[in-house]
Amino acid sequence: MFEYDIIAVDPKTHARAGVLHTPHGDVPTPIFMPVGTKATVKGLLPSSLRDLGTKILLANTYHCSMRPGAEHIAEMGGLHEFMRWDGPILTDSGGFQVFSLSEHFKLSDDGVRFHAVDYGGEIVEWTPEENMRIAQLLGADIVMQLDQCPGYPAERAFVERAVELSSKWADRCWASHTRKDQALFGIVQGGMHLDLRLRSLRHLEECGDFPGYGIGGYSVGEDHATMFKTLAPLASEYMPRSKPRYLMGVGNPTTLVRGVACGIDMFDCVLPTRTARMGTAFSNEGRLNLKNARFRSDRRTLVEGCGCPACAGGFTRDYLHHLVRQHEMTGAILLSLHNIYYLLDLMRRARQAIIDGTYESFVADWEASDAVNDF
Amino acid sequence: MFEYDIIAVDPKTHARAGVLHTPHGDVPTPIFMPVGTKATVKGLLPSSLRDLGTKILLANTYHCSMRPGAEHIAEMGGLHEFMRWDGPILTDSGGFQVFSLSEHFKLSDDGVRFHAVDYGGEIVEWTPEENMRIAQLLGADIVMQLDQCPGYPAERAFVERAVELSSKWADRCWASHTRKDQALFGIVQGGMHLDLRLRSLRHLEECGDFPGYGIGGYSVGEDHATMFKTLAPLASEYMPRSKPRYLMGVGNPTTLVRGVACGIDMFDCVLPTRTARMGTAFSNEGRLNLKNARFRSDRRTLVEGCGCPACAGGFTRDYLHHLVRQHEMTGAILLSLHNIYYLLDLMRRARQAIIDGTYESFVADWEASDAVNDF
């Protein structure tokens, strides 16, 4: 049910093009997954996402399980039916939110106990088993194991303990996850230490036959050189070739282009919609902050030749500047459409370059462009 | 260029069905016009409005002239090009906003001087000539004369002076408006006094051959009985039959149904989008406040058989309740789509009933329904 077919490997980089089969449809890889935090992508309807070319959505387990609750979503027919998206869905474990959003959390081998500060400070206890129960109630096509994501910088000993805990939780998630129409991915942790990354990976490979692997704990404050120093060998040399590799929480264009070269297949991030709500658009010139007065009277669309509804619809930078300055919802909507399209299209073009065997020059073109410093 | 063809008159009410020809397309009447306050309908793109069946949009002169400015919009090609709406547009005069939004205004025969409180307190002076200059720069298909809209309740003497001033301004607007591709409508004021309404109307008829008439100064706090006591005879007995009649700023379904019976042809209001942003939907049961806990687990769509993207898309009241409770933009968007569709569809069905000669029973059905008390 969750076969992953690799259809092309770039001859000069580690990039691969593939197809991930899920119960709700096929996902071409490499792919960017827009994030529907609370069972909705902020500002965009499922029909618009479909029109943009979205193939798979992410929803956040933490938020969905707090409101309206996993039992409720299950009662309403599961996430797909609830949010009216009939394509593939991936849910994270919620661990990242627990460790970044909650005010107080207490870790033990058995799980995590936390105050959900966004939701009236309610006290929640997640064991790996409870986390898998929630994942199965939500009913996404792909779910992630519960893990502990350390920040950056972090003491090596702290990261090591996070790997140990995540490994134990991987065992228990694997043992308690039973839905056959749902793929459970393990998550590789280990911070910026390659040996810890490999220890984490080896444990996952011994634990069970995971149909895919998440790579967590990057893009937590480190610079690109630090990130790729361990990410590149991890992805390109050590991770099993036949399984999809998902770099979690990464959404800036340059990291996508470089990540694909290392053999990453899947990405997700709130960046395109969050920056859109702040008035910022991705472009081949780097990010455009539409609030800036220089866009007044600029009759150009955001990106020449772009096929998104904002650009193809002829909305000028001048008009977007007006909307953003006036805090109009339609500004955030047009920029969200553009930014998501930009990443989807970037990955579509990357995939074609891999199939054509020209991904190396695709990367070189990107590195030589004005967009490269945008992260 | 602005011919108004009446194609059917209901035999038992004063309702008429017509077609208003404009340079940007034909407008079937009766019609509801969604409001794009700052050159955008909050939360909805022009393509979505088109898909809903919108035939004509309204934009606010006050807001557009303050930001980004009428000269700027003209430089960008006018309102149609600026906001990427190629259908008909109507702009109000801005008088209503000046008298309701500005902190201090000073009236004289020559015009009005006001502080634009929403825009840094900037001091603005509008003579009728300046107001027409702005209207011509914005370039809508239909523009309204500058008028003074008294509130309710108001002293008769105050209303009388407002009629006198509005009449003088009508003369000056008529004299200074020169764009032949733009229709200038006069505005009938006079509060809840039929004799003042008729004085206002007579003056307009003597002033010039206005291609249409606005009716201002209703829906300012009075109850329905008070409103229709003068509105009904004004519209059905005294206003010229061959010209479109536009009841300004009215958007609740029941007033639309009753207004059409009196011979009103055009309506506009921010109500469908403003209430949507507050979590409220129009329905045949009256307004639904989706924040209400009773909608949790309600698997029905908002209105059975409704063709809007929210209902036809299968979004349940349960899901909308979740979105509204979580302050998600998509909640406001889905409810805005629904509410605008609801009014557009109400007027489409009203028009068909007029053509079929059955508008009297259309009104009777409405008056007998649960929706009737919704205003």
Image: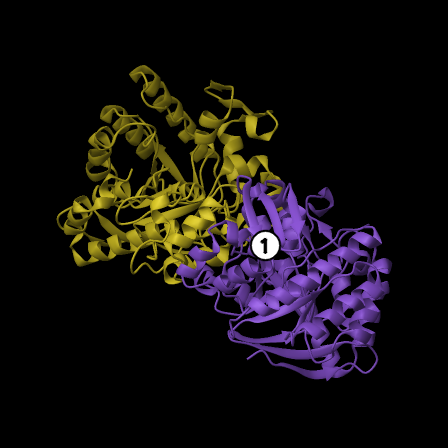
Chain colours: A purple, B yellow
The image quarter containing residue B255 is: top left
A41 sits left or right of B219 in the view:
right
B167 sits left or right of A139 in the view:
left
Depicted B269 relative to depicted A202: above or below: above
Q: Residue at x 33, y 49 (%)?
A: B343
Residue B108 in view, yes or no: yes
Element marked by disc 1: helix
Q: Please provide percent x and percent y for residue B84.
A: 54, 54
- Please tell me which residue lies in front, B124 or A177: A177
Q: Please provide percent x and percent y for residue B39.
A: 53, 45
Q: Residue at x 61, y 69 (%)?
A: A174
Q: Residue at x 24, y 57 (%)?
A: B352
Residue A54 in view, yes or no: no
Q: Mark 1 = which residue?
A: A334
- Please tell me which residue lies in front, A365 or B116: A365
Q: Please provide percent x and percent y for residue A5.
A: 65, 83
A23 sits left or right of B56 in the view:
right
The image quarter containing residue A53 is: bottom right
Q: Which residue is drawn at 21% across and 41% down?
A: B262
- Please tell me which residue lies in front, B359 or A35: A35
